[in-house]
């Protein structure tokens, strides 16, 4: 296992040295409110190349550029629509990624050769402190995918990052520990390059919130269809592969669990005899927050099968069902 260092605090000095590391081309794993990100200077092609190596991800997939504030948007994008501005104003910092037309700053190794770029201001003190420290030394964006191996469950704690990537990081790489991610599932991705917003990946920023912010009707992917038929072929969203976010254990949706199986459901579902309860969230927000840790725990316990009861509702529940359905497609 690699000996990446841990930084447990968020002092100005610690953030300044993490930012200097990013500027020097080192990878820095950092916490966000959604999941942990595997970060590199978004203008450094060699550093970004290492993200792909460490993740084991095909190189043509585009990366989200994390920025310190909405005012940095204009550096990375052009022709930003009015509705994208209202979304940024209403939900940044927050669990939302906007796909906008790229500026010359967003090079092909970030966008996967597409004319669009994904931007996000994360809502986490450590991430924001790191982004501020980076901005001070001329690094205007941190490219970061979720800090997991390709196709696997995203990490929501620093120790999950070590499990996922410890063997692939180099000794000079850093992992910033910011505690458990409070949202727990990846950001809502909204394509803002057309006349109306289009959700490419559901998350904690819901259809209702987007419609209230923009005054426009939103198109969202239909979860029951193969993603290829609802998402343009030219827009590559790796999280849109049918099998993704998948643990080793087989995830079975909506059945009564049997002895020896893991079980994830809201707390009002009781645990049958011999069943291993992996999460008992009291509401949907807790469900999202605890889901990935529960799937990880299933693998740690060596469980072969996990039964999950999907939450009902049209808010963050849509995103939870999306992740559960992808996890259930297995490897
Ligand atoms: O919550 C999140 O979004 C986390 C944290 C770390 O910010 N990041 C994350 O990154 O989930 P990643 O790379 O695991 O997923 C981002 C998705 C990918 O599927 C990528 O293909 C898509 O966003 N994406 C990025 N740029 C895009 C673009 N220009 N057009 C379409 N999809 C894009
Ligand atoms: Mg990911």
Image (cartoon, rainbow, N blue to C red):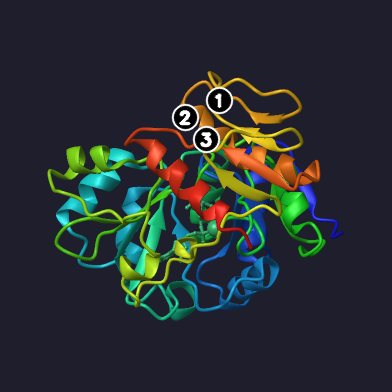
Could you say where residue 149 lies in the image, as x and y percent from the top left? Answer: 67, 62
Q: How far apart are marks 3 and 1 (CA)?
A: 11 Å
Question: Would residue 101 appear left or right of 282 to someone viewing this image?
Answer: left
Q: Which numbered disc covers residue 309? A: 3
Residue depicted at x 56% and y 73%: 44
Q: Are marks 1 and 2 in contact (CB under 8 Å)?
A: yes
Q: What residue did someone put label 1 on?
A: 281
Sequence-wise, the earlier of marks 3 and 1 is: 1
Sequence-wise, the earlier of marks 3 and 2 is: 2
Q: What residue did someone put label 2 on?
A: 285
Could you say where residue 91 lies in the image, as x and y percent from the top left? Answer: 32, 40
Residue labelled 1 has its Cβ within 8 Å of some atom of ligand 1: no
Q: Which numbered disc covers residue 318? A: none
Is the residue marked by circle 1 packed among few (<14), some (14-19), or many (20+) residues within 10 Å?
some
Instruction: Tell me the quadrant of ligand 2.
Output: bottom right
Residue 331 lies in what quarter of the image?
bottom right
Residue depicted at x 60% and y 44%: 31
Q: Is mark 2 on a helix, strand or loop?
A: helix
Q: Which of marks 3 and 1 is in front?
A: 3
Q: Which residue is more in the foreground, 270 or 192?
A: 270
């Amino acid at each position: 296992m690699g000996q990446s260092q841990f930084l447990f605090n968020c002092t100005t000095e610690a953030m300044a040295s993490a930012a200097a590391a990013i500027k020097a081309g080192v990878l820095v794993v950092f916490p966000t409110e959604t999941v942990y990100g595997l970060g590199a200077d978004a203008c450094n092609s060699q550093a970004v190349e290492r993200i792909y190596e460490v993740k084991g991800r095909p190189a043509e997939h585009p990366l989200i550029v994390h920025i310190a504030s909405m005012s940095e948007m204009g550096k990375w994008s052009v022709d930003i629509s009015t509705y994208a501005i209202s979304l940024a104003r209403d939900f940044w910092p927050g669990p939302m990624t906007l796909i906008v037309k790229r500026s010359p700053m967003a090079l092909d190794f970030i966008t996967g050769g597409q004319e669009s770029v994904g931007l996000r201001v994360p809502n986490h003190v450590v991430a924001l402190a790191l982004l501020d420290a980076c901005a001070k030394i001329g690094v205007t964006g941190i490219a970061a995918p979720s800090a997991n191996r390709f196709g696997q469950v995203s990490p929501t704690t620093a120790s999950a990052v070590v499990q996922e990537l410890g063997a692939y990081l180099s000794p000079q790489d850093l992992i910033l520990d910011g505690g458990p991610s409070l949202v727990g599932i990846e950001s809502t991705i909204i394509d803002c390059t057309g006349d109306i917003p289009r959700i490419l990946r559901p998350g904690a920023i819901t259809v209702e919130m987007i419609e209230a912010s923009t005054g426009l009707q939103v198109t969202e992917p239909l979860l029951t269809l193969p993603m290829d038929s609802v998402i343009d072929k030219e827009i590559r969203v790796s999280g849109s592969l049918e099998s993704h976010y998948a643990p080793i254990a087989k995830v079975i949706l909506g059945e009564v669990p049997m002895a020896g199986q893991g079980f994830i459901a809201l707390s009002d579902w009781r645990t049958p005899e011999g069943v291993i309860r992996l999460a008992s969230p009291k509401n949907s927000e807790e469900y999202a927050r605890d889901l990935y840790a529960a799937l990880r725990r299933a693998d740690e316990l060596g469980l072969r099968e996990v039964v999950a009861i999907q939450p009902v509702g049209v808010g963050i529940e849509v995103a939870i069902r999306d992740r559960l359905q992808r996890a259930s497609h297995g490897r």
